[in-house]
Image (tube, rainbow, N blue to C red):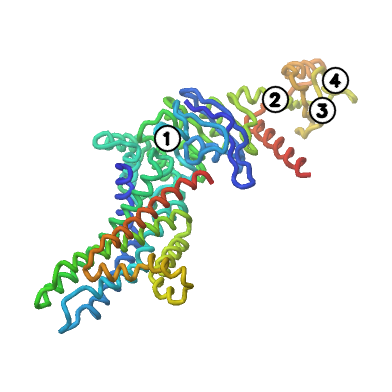
Amino acid sequence: MSAALSIASREFLAMFRLPAGWIVTALYLLISGLVFGLVVLDPGGPASLRAFFGVSGWLLLPVVPAVSMRLMSEELRSGTIEPLLTAPVSDWAVALGKYLGGALFLSAMLAPTLVYVGVLFAVADPAPDPGPIVAGYVTLLLTGLLYLAAGLFFSSLTSSQTLAYLGTMFLFLALLAAPAGAAWAPGPVRPALFAVALGPRIADLAKGVIDLSHAVFFLSLSALFVVLSALAIESRRWR
Amino acid sequence: MILAEGIEKSFGSVRAVRGVSFQFRPGEVVGLLGPNGAGKSTTIRILVGYCPPDRGRVEVNGHDSIRASLAARAGIGYLPDSAPIYPEMRTVDYLRHRAHLFGLRGRRRTEAVERSIERCRLGDARRRRVGELSKGYRQRVGLAAALLHDPPVLILDEPTSGLDPTQIMQVRELVRELAETRTMLISSHILPEVERVCGRVMVMAGGRILADGPPDALVAEHADPALYRLEVAGAPAPGDSPGAIPGVRGLGAAAGAPGRSAWSITGDRGAPDLREALGRWAADRALVVTELTRERTSLERVFHGLIAGVESGDTERRA
């Protein structure tokens, strides 16, 4: 576990030492700021961040894969994977460390959006209900963590950051568009598409409904992708 | 210390390592020689636990490299080819991170990092980002990282590749220093480097070990027939030449200074040194010897001879 933490802290700090980390953060804050300024700040409207959290699946879609794409792909491309995998550290610790590092960076990237909460409390009368805001942040984190885990998996498969980015983005684009696709899908496939659809789950959570089944869905899928990443790292040794 | 038994590794249809076996005793410094694509790096990657062999087994300090992989890896310091290091990290931060991965904490970690920095003379680079360092410095950072946990076994893959002559000298000096207290494997295609540092040499080509032993023994075993050059002032009588001396297998005229005669002479394989007989032959004819030399077979020559044997074998098989 200690080695995983060391890998996590290296990964977290690396994101801030590279322009990519700052660009990704700036891009996210720009998009989320636009949503906040143009949609949430509605004079006379209800004081709620529901609109902001409701689109979190789409807001995170272009940025989280940009964080996850380098986690393993860059190691594979530059050859730093060799010293890493010859240290006395298990492949599981490598996958977990990479994931934790990405999760820390994701949290740091989301943290400035707390300013929106402050602004809302300052300008809204009556003050907004804090419950849905907490639930909204849980949504944001759960969605981000799921994207990150899948991104780590794609990044473990290829030394091309572009491929890792595209793989992650298209997977979640498909999951976000699943309910719309269900309308055209043949009958037996429809329930499966609704089961994996992200949009309705994010919408429920953004409303402030903390449904345990949604939380379990996000967390178990994230865990599955981290496990697959560890297996992908291990399988590289046998190729 | 290191034991490899019948290791084999293929990548698709390419058989990179074909049934290689060896054993390194404690304190032994072994040079692994071979041309590009000989299977050196794959063999090393198997030893350091980066990839398992398809067949055979490896033991490092008594630990099986697959069943007790973490324990085996903990006893090795490894410098991969071209020393890949995170370019955005400062030297000291990278070394701290590596020390952590090798289980060093607190004071032990600080001491290990400082010891490595001092040993590899990285004092002036400690706060610099690795990406800003010259290749020589990066190589030293990689070496410092490999030494952090004071491993009993050190494996260096092409430690001087791509370095300028001054940097090569610095790294070579450091390697010689380290070799005094450790079991070492140095892979290289630069022969003088291996000849100077290693007490044992393994020559590899086509995924196989072609020769294994002390450099002197390899030279003696694979030496060419001795070559001599004789130059005398004046010329012997027509029809007379050193070709009649017992032990001489071949004789050719060589270029000599004006007014002198010169020959290039090949001795029989295993024949005693012919210099005395050649000198006596000239003295008997009252010819003043102006040059009499014997060309020594170098490790380089042995190496090229072995490699050429494999290459011509491959060509014959393809034909």
Q: Specify the amino acid type for callout 3.
A: Leu
Q: Which tag, 2 or 4, sits closer to the chain's start?
A: 4
Q: Residue at x 27, y 37 (%)?
A: B105
Q: Secondary structure at mark 2?
A: strand
Q: Which mark is residue A206?
A: none
Q: Residue at x 62, y 22 (%)?
A: B217
Residue B275: percent from the left, percent from the top? 73, 19
Q: CA distance from mark 1 to mark 3?
A: 57 Å
Q: What is the chain letter for disc 2?
A: B
Q: Specify the amino acid type for callout 1.
A: Arg
Q: Which tag, 1 or 3, sits closer to the chain's start?
A: 1
Q: Residue at x 64, y 46 (%)?
A: B13
Q: Mark 3 and mark 2 in contact? Answer it, CB < 8 Å.
A: no
Q: Residue at x 27, y 62 (%)?
A: A141
Q: CA distance from mark 2 to mark 1?
A: 48 Å
Vertical side of B211 occupied by A205: above or below = below
Q: Secondary structure at mark 1?
A: helix
Which quadrant would the N terminus of chain A be assigned to in this image? top left
Q: Which residue is mark 4?
A: B244
Q: Which tag, 2 or 1, sits closer to the chain's start?
A: 1
Q: Which residue is mark 3?
A: B251
Q: Which residue is mark 2?
A: B294
* Front tag of 1 and 3: 1
